[in-house]
Amino acid sequence: MRPDITPGAAFPDYELPDHRGKHLTLSELQGADPLVLVLSRGGFCPKERRQHEGLLQLHREMGVSYCRLVTSSTDNLFETNEFRSGVGAHWTFLSDPGRKLQKDLDIAEYTDPHHNPMIPHTLVLERSRSRRFVVRMTFRWRSGNRRCAVHASKSSRKHFTSVGSSRS
């Protein structure tokens, strides 16, 4: 992991191309709202596709709560667009074929050398002085109402300040 990515430090303001090919920084995508950044294995993975189909419902709820959702994978631009349209997503997908996030966070998936994806993680970043969490996201479908539940174990939490700012 990069030495400057530590608990309490500012999370780097990465600039990556979105699904349209436009280069955007995380702070531009975040604006004044909290940002949920899903680090995905990529569109080739059926589990990731299924998870993102579940995120469709969550995304609608996030809009009401003034929270933004962004997915990043190591897919190229063509694969990123296929992934996004294949699951019917309406939020921003970032393409990181150079594996900048994967390398900086040291989250290479060692069991798949062919695709060389990231180990899935979810980062939650806010624009306030409160602490931020890096969490592993899991989904559990409740029988009957198919509501999506997000869980994070305390052992997987790491604290960060907001994108591009320093802790005071």
Image (tube, rainbow, N blue to C red):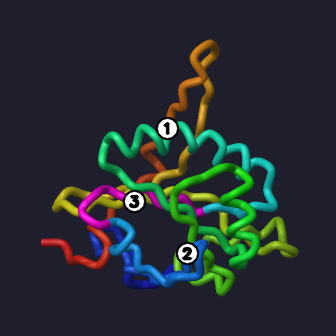
Q: Position of residue 1 (x, y in %)?
A: 51, 79
The Cα atoms of the two marked residues, 1 and 2, are separated by 27 Å
Callout in the foreground (1, 2): 2
- Residues at marks 3 and 2, CA–CA distance in whole angstroms: 26 Å
* Of the image marks 1 and 3, the number of the one nearer the N terminus: 1
* Place of residue 137 in the rendered image (x, y in percent of width and height, measured from the top left): 54, 46
Where the C terminus falls, by quadrant? bottom left
Distance from disc 1 to disc 3, alpha carbons, whole Å, reads 15 Å
4 and 101: which is toward the camera:
101
Q: Which residue is mark 2?
A: 18
Residue that mark 3 sits on: 158
Closer-to-camera residue (8/23): 23
| Residue 64 versus residue 46 in the image, above or below | above
Give the magenta range.
Answer: 31-39
Mark 2 Cα shell of 10 Å, populated few (<14), some (14-19), many (≥20): many
Q: Mark 1 — residue?
A: 151
Residues 161 and 158: in front is: 161
Rendered view: 9 above or below 37:
below
Asked which secondary structure carries label 2, the reply is loop
Q: Is residue 50 left or right of residue 28?
A: right
Indicate the secondary structure of the residue bearing disc 1.
strand
Marked residue nearer the N-terminal end (3 or 2)? 2
Label 3: which secondary element = loop
Residue 14 in view (yes/no): yes
Q: Is residue 33 magenta?
A: yes
Per the rendering, the mark at residue 159 is none
